[in-house]
Image (tube, rainbow, N blue to C red):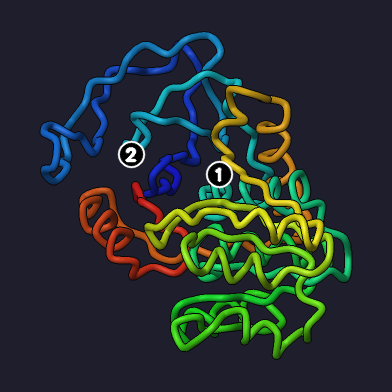
């Protein structure tokens, strides 16, 4: 069976069964039996498979994904190319879907532009670096909270890096690009990091908000938008599934295409066996991981 993603939205890569195949075998699943308590591994009876369910695919599911079997509608499945591994495919949902829409659909990054990426060593940050650098040929400044994370971001394609735990992000960026600023900022931290990213933008710069990993949501100083003709926008990838499915689906098809062509190189931060699902969640919550955390069913 395929590797599984352990993150908030839990989209997995699957090997699916065709309708009518054997369904008597129970399968193991991580089950929540009580809120605020560790998950338990249980043997679960499979439910019948419908006529539109089955193949070697990557998929998105909000529930029942951390298990050896997951049944879902074919609309939220994408066929995995033969030369793409199941582990690489499992990294693509959320992180690369978000990265592609942030870089192309929202920021509309052009070749040669300078892009500031915060939380750069996280799963989405690394995906943004990968897509912006290797597909759109942009110059990326990676911003992260430790020298180790900055080093990883550089290894994954960033041209330069800033450790924002050591001082002003705006001042550090200015030293790298001068007073003109960066063309695009993609922020996942929020709070003061968002504000400094905003102040680091060039004339007609664009900033895309992807999250608030720092825990604080900043208020946008609208005078900065006016003075520099800046565009501030948000991106919630999962919302496109319901509001504009064509865009949502294309982001996944594009991610698989880039992976098949060797343009992007998904990074796995850690892999846990299904029995270690609570350790995997703890690993994510303690921010020990750089990159995507997966559950393996092998």
- In-front residue for pair 141/99: 141
Q: Earlier in the sequence, mark 2 or mark 1?
A: 2
- In-front residue for pair 281/161: 161
Residue labelled with disc 2: 66
Q: Residues within 10 Å of mark 1 (few under 14, many from 20)?
A: many
Residue labelled with disc 1: 93
Location of residue 226 in the rendering, given as x and y in whole percent from the top left corner: 76, 55
| Between marks 2 and 1 in the image, the one whose residue lies nearer the viewer | 1
Residue 295 lies left or right of residue 74; in this view the side is left
Circles 2 and 1, Cβ within 8 Å, touching? The answer is no
Rendering quarter of residue 118: bottom right
Residue drawn at the location 51% of the way across and 48% of the way down: 90
Look at the image and tell me whether residue 264 can be seen.
yes
Location of residue 137 in the rendering, given as x and y in whole percent from the top left corner: 83, 67
Location of residue 288 in the rendering, given as x and y in whole percent from the top left corner: 33, 70
Disc 2, SS: loop
* Quadrant for the N terminus in the image: top left
In the depicted structure, whether residue 89 falls above or below residue 163:
above
Q: Which mark is residue 259?
A: none
Residue drawn at the location 83% of the way across and 66% of the way down: 203
Look at the image and tell me whether residue 260 can be seen.
no
**What separation in Å lies between label 2 and label 1 (alpha carbons)?**
15 Å
In the depicted structure, whether residue 251 falls above or below residue 110:
above
Residue 8 lies left or right of residue 202; in this view the side is left
Residue drawn at the location 34% of the way across and 47% of the way down: 297
Disc 1, SS: helix
Location of residue 251 in the rendering, given as x and y in whole percent from the top left corner: 69, 40
Rendering quarter of residue 252: top right
In the depicted structure, whether residue 224 falls above or below residue 6:
below
- How many marks on residues? 2
């Amino acid at each position: 069976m395929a590797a599984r993603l352990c993150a908030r939205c839990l989209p997995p890569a699957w090997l699916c069964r065709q309708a009518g195949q054997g369904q008597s075998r129970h399968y193991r699943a991580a089950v929540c039996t009580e809120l605020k308590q560790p998950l338990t591994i249980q043997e679960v009876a499979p439910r019948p498979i419908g006529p539109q369910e089955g193949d070697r695919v990557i998929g998105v599911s909000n529930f029942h994904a951390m298990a050896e079997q997951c049944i879902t509608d074919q609309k939220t499945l994408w066929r995995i190319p033969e030369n793409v591994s199941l582990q690489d495919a499992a990294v693509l949902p959320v992180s690369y879907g978000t990265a592609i829409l942030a870089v192309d659909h929202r920021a509309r990054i052009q070749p040669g532009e300078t892009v500031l990426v915060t939380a750069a060593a996280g799963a989405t940050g690394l995906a943004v670096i990968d897509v912006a650098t290797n597909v759109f040929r942009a110059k990326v400044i990676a911003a992260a909270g430790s020298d180790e994370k900055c080093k990883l971001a550089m290894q994954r394609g960033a041209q330069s890096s800033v450790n924002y735990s050591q001082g002003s992000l705006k001042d550090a960026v200015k030293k790298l690009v001068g007073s003109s600023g960066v063309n695009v900022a993609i922020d996942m931290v929020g709070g003061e990091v968002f504000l400094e990213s905003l102040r680091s933008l060039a004339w007609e710069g664009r900033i895309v908000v992807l999250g608030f990993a720092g825990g604080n949501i900043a208020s946008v100083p609208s005078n900065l938008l006016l003075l520099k003709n800046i565009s501030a926008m948000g991106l919630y990838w999962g919302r496109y599934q319901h509001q504009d499915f064509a865009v949502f689906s294309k982001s996944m098809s594009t991610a698989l295409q880039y992976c098949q062509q060797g343009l992007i190189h998904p990074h796995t931060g850690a892999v846990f066996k299904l029995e270690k699902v609570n350790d995997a969640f703890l690993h994510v919550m303690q921010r020990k991981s750089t990159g995507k955390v997966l559950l393996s069913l092998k």
